[in-house]
Image: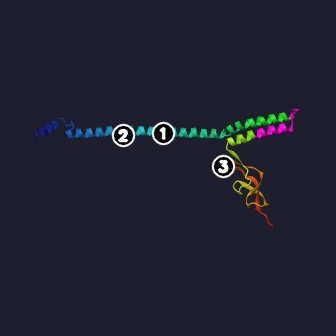
Amino acid sequence: MTDKSVDQEDMNQDNPDQPTEGEVEGRANRGGETSEIEQLKAQLAEKEEERLRMAAEMQNMRHRTEREVESARKFALERFVEGLLPVVDSLELGIEASRLEGATLEKIREGDEMTLKMLTQTLEKFGVEPIHPIGERFNPDQHQAMTMQPHEGEPDHVVDVMQKGYLLKERVVRPALVAVSKPKQD
């Protein structure tokens, strides 16, 4: 036995409550484990708090987006209505002008043409285009055939438009009501 071993044994015999060197090292390791566990618990708590903040932020974003979409739906037509109001004003002025004593049919027609031009420009501004397909091949996606007419030209072409159709950003709002050509029979 070495002197150190003997001294250690003597110390243990003198004070049995005193931990041995191995016990001290074991406790130090457990103390290190305990501090590591505490660190991991703190990290876990921090990550959980971060996750909760992110979940709350996502929930807030979802609610904000829902409010924005609802508002967009509610006021989607606002700009369109603002564009149409001058047309309404023009029609009202035209009606008032037609009641005046010096009103002529020519002046009323001129006012109506200006109002129609204003309305057409407003519709175009918002992506509304007329379908006026005379001479085009019949397209059942954009045209509704009302009648077939014998015609000298190619068959299945539009020879007359009874009512213009309209597209809204290339989507049919109303098909054009048309007469379609069929070969003349002798």
Cβ–Cβ below 8 Å for labels 1 and 2? no
Q: Residue 110, percent across and down?
A: 81, 38
Which quarter of the figure has residue 39?
top left
Give me the residue at 63% from left, 39% from top. Answer: 72
Give me the residue at 75% from left, 50% from top. Answer: 164
Q: Foreground residue, 60 or 138? A: 138
Query: Label 3 is placed on what type of residue?
Result: Glu
Q: Which residue is mark 3?
A: 170
Q: Foreground residue, 144 or 115? A: 115
**Which numbered disc, 1 or 3, marks the residue that appears first in the sequence?**
1
Please indicate whether residue 160 sits to the left or right of residue 31 in the image.
right
Please indicate whether residue 61 sits to the left or right of residue 139 in the image.
left
In the orientation shown, which residue stands out farthest toward the front? 152
Q: Which residue is mark 2?
A: 40
Label 1: which secondary element: helix
Please indicate whether residue 168 sits to the left or right of residue 12 in the image.
right
Q: In the rendered view, would you say 147 is above or below 95?
A: below
Q: Residue 8, percent across and down?
A: 15, 38
Q: Which residue is mark 1?
A: 54
Tell us which disc is closer to us: 1 or 2. 1
